[in-house]
Image: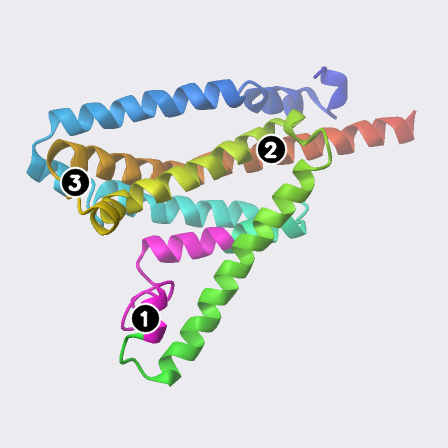
């Protein structure tokens, strides 16, 4: 992009800082990050690893303010707020609440588990509002996926760096969820118990990649706003020509 695309040189310099953060750079950064997690597992003792990557460890707890920061950026009234950003902000708030265990803090079990509604002795007065919250969260997720898929079908969506970053973040979400369920799936489906070093690696990657998610989506958001700023500047230049 040339400096003429922007209204000022400061805007151009600031935007270029995120132009260089492309899919290749982010993928390499994630690989280096994974190598760092691997090193932690190998260096730390099992007790230290249990503390660092536990549900109340630094990776888990740092995720909460990162998701809240992402939500704040989505609802930043200094910028134009569009419907996808509202969905993004609400999903970030739900993610922060889930990391803080709010999805099971006020009920007998997680509101996202089916056995809570069918098997638990919790009263109906508790299950109904919990189910409404869960349905709203799932509706947001599916609506967000729908918006993303609809944009991808436009033909040139992946030419946008912010969309490439968004896809990378979505893939990372699915990878972290697979890691989160891998040990229980191996036990339930194949009768295998994953323990020891392999179990520690899975736990470290799951917690580590979960913490990276709000950072990846935050980069996508900044790239999106830079692209929108460039588009507005080009249109203004054409109108003023």
Using the numbered discs, state the Cα–Cα distance from disc 3 to disc 1 in whole angstroms: 26 Å
Q: Which residue is mark 1?
A: 116
Q: Is residue 50 left or right of residue 177?
A: left
For the rendered model, the colour scheme is rainbow
Give the x, y percent position of residue 38. Answer: 22, 25
As drawn, 67 above or below 198:
below
Residues in magenta, as a range: 91-118
Q: Which residue is mark 3?
A: 194
As drawn, 68 above or below 119:
above
- Number of numbered discs: 3
Mark 2 surroundings within 10 Å by alpha-carbon count, few (fewer than 14), some (14 through 19), many (20 or more): many
Q: Which of the image's four quarters has the N terminus?
A: top right
Query: Is residue 93 located in the magenta-colored stretch of the structure?
Result: yes
Mark 3 surroundings within 10 Å by alpha-carbon count, few (fewer than 14), some (14 through 19), many (20 or more): some
Q: Looking at the rendering, which quadrant does residue 19 occupy?
A: top right
Q: Which residue is mark 2?
A: 163
Q: Could you say whether the residue bearing mark 1 is in a helix, strand or loop?
A: helix
Q: Nearer the viewer, mark 2 or mark 1?
A: 1
Using the numbered discs, state the Cα–Cα distance from disc 2 to disc 3 in whole angstroms: 36 Å
Mark with earlier residue (2, 3): 2
């Amino acid at each position: 992009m040339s400096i003429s695309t922007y209204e000022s040189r400061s805007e151009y310099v600031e935007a270029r800082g995120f132009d260089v953060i492309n899919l290749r750079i982010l993928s390499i950064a994630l690989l280096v990050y994974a190598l760092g997690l691997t090193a932690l597992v190998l260096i730390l003792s099992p007790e230290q690893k249990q503390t660092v990557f536990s549900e109340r460890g630094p990776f888990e707890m740092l995720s909460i303010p990162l998701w809240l920061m992402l939500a704040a950026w989505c609802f930043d009234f200094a910028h134009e707020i569009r419907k996808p950003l509202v969905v993004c902000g609400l999903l970030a708030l739900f993610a922060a609440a889930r990391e803080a265990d709010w999805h099971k803090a006020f009920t007998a079990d997680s509101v996202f588990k089916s056995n809570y509604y069918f098997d638990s002795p919790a009263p109906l007065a508790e299950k109904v509002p919990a189910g409404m919250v869960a349905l709203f969260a799932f509706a947001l997720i599916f609506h967000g996926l729908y918006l993303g898929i609809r944009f991808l079908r436009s033909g040139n969506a992946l030419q946008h760096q912010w969309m490439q970053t968004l896809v990378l973040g979505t893939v990372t979400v699915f990878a972290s969820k697979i890691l989160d369920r891998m040990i229980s799936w191996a036990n339930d489906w194949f009768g295998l118990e994953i323990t020891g070093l392999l179990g520690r690696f899975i736990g470290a990657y799951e917690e580590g990649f979960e913490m990276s998610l709000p950072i990846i989506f935050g980069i996508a958001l900044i790239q999106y706003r830079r692209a929108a700023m460039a588009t507005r500047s080009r249109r203004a230049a054409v109108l003023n020509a």
